[in-house]
Image (cartoon, rainbow, N blue to C red):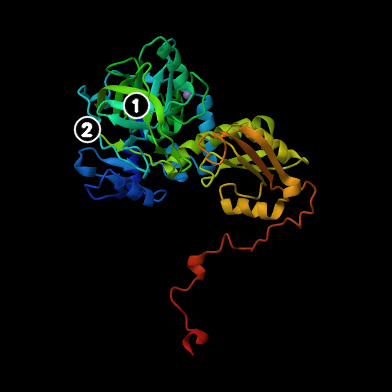
Amino acid sequence: MTDTLRFPSLRSWVRHLVAEDHVAFANPGVSLKYELAAIASRLDGHKATLFPSPAGMDIPVVSGVVGRREWIADALGVSETELLDSFMAASNNPIPCAEVTNAPVQTNVQRDVDIFKHLPLPTHAAEDSGPYITAGLLIARNPDTGAQNVSINRLQASGPDRLGVLILPRHAHHYLEPVEARGEDFPVAIVIGVDPLTLLASQAIAPLDQDELEIAGALHGQALEVVKCVTSDVRVPAHAEIVLEGRVLAGVREPEGPFGEFPKYYGPRSDKHVIQIDAVTMRQNPLFHTILGGGLEHLLLGSIPREATILAHLRRTFTSVLDVHLSLGGVGRYHLYVKINKRQRGEAKNIIMGAFSAHYDIKHVTVVDDDVDVHDPEMVEWALATRFQADRDLVIVPNAQGSKLDPSNDDGFGAKMGMDATKPVGADPFTFLQTRIPGEDTVDLGAVLAGERPAIAALDDD
Ligand code: MN
């Protein structure tokens, strides 16, 4: 059945990246402590990196597999301009998973768990508390309804069969809380190494009880195959590389962190939930995926599903909104650029206020006209430089909810700023006409440029 999918697994996607010359191969034996991350970080956004037998271990590590926006569009089989609409269509039309009983990910089952011995666990940033699993999809199951939730949580390797985990008060936490209150452990699965569309779907801003794996199915255009865990009722992608099956221990909290997070600052050390690992299942010859905190893979996985949700949110009220972008300099969360076809005076300010309500992480909103490319930060800055006046076009909202990982605010309590960098309605069109050189976009440089330096007297004589 999955034979018909373009990329049913991480390995099939990595094979495609290799064929497209998007993968760099490290020498065997790279150190898991910092060196692997250093190499992957230097190549971030240029190439994915594959590390055969890092530190002499059997399992190769891959990083940066969705480190470019165009690769994500490629995985979806759409153009970059269709990316957000395509993601939103899938989010609105999820496809229930197809359960199988025989899954590649359960080829090897280990119940005598030692993650330090069997998994190549890298340490990334200088102040990280130690090795982390950073590309693990944590799957939680609503014990009453069977609805599942997928999220990527940072997972500290605390012991051979023990993980420290940050579970924010979102969907997985909602399922966990009543179970823990009864004094019972809460079964979870951690899935490492999935296809790029499942990776993207895991970050969808979906409602509670909407299984992100069903959005993955919709992105694939076909039900995602899942299999029941060997130690619990949790269902996991059948074509994943590695699954850790375990339980969040009731009433147990242990130190976790610090850990280098998406804003390129550290999340602090504090007491967090603990997962006891009961079994590890793997494909034959598995791949281990690691995501660099704050790297492009991390930022794009966070930003693209959010952009799709924010665009849909704004379009419900404002028909003039054409496109949105969460800039990478704004860590894929804090800086929103909105492109509009402005028709009414004041409209941009209403859109700024609407955008603040789309997600509390949004801190600074810049609204531009339809002749500005929101994916080009220099163009957005140009619009601010030439179409914005601070006394007239600036919106500031003090004392609002923001991101707790923004070190400039007070534990998530801080200011919002909106900038209207659009032309005034009814402005003289010539005043705001961008200069243009006829033929610049179409000139055939291969035809008009000389292959070698011509004889020019001024360059040849003293
Ligand atoms: Mn969810």
SS for dot 2: helix
What residue sits 49% from the left and 68% below the top? 447
Q: CA distance from mark 1 to mark 2?
A: 15 Å
Nearer-N-terminus badge (1/2):
2
Whether residue 423 is visible, yes or no, is no
What residue sits 30% from the left and 40% below the top? 122
Farthest bottom residue in view: 462
Q: Quadrant of the N terminus?
A: top left
SS for dot 1: strand
Give whichever of 412, 448 is nearer the camera.
412
Which residue does the numbered mark 1 point to in the structure image?
190
Please, what is the three-letter code of the amino acid marked with disc 2?
His
Which residue does the numbered mark 2 point to in the structure image?
118
Please, what is the three-letter code of the amino acid marked with disc 1?
Ile
* Residue 371 location (% of width, % of height): 66, 50
Q: How many residues crowd around disc 1 within 10 Å: few (fewer than 14), some, or many (20 or more)?
A: many
What residue sits 71% from the left and 47% below the top? 422
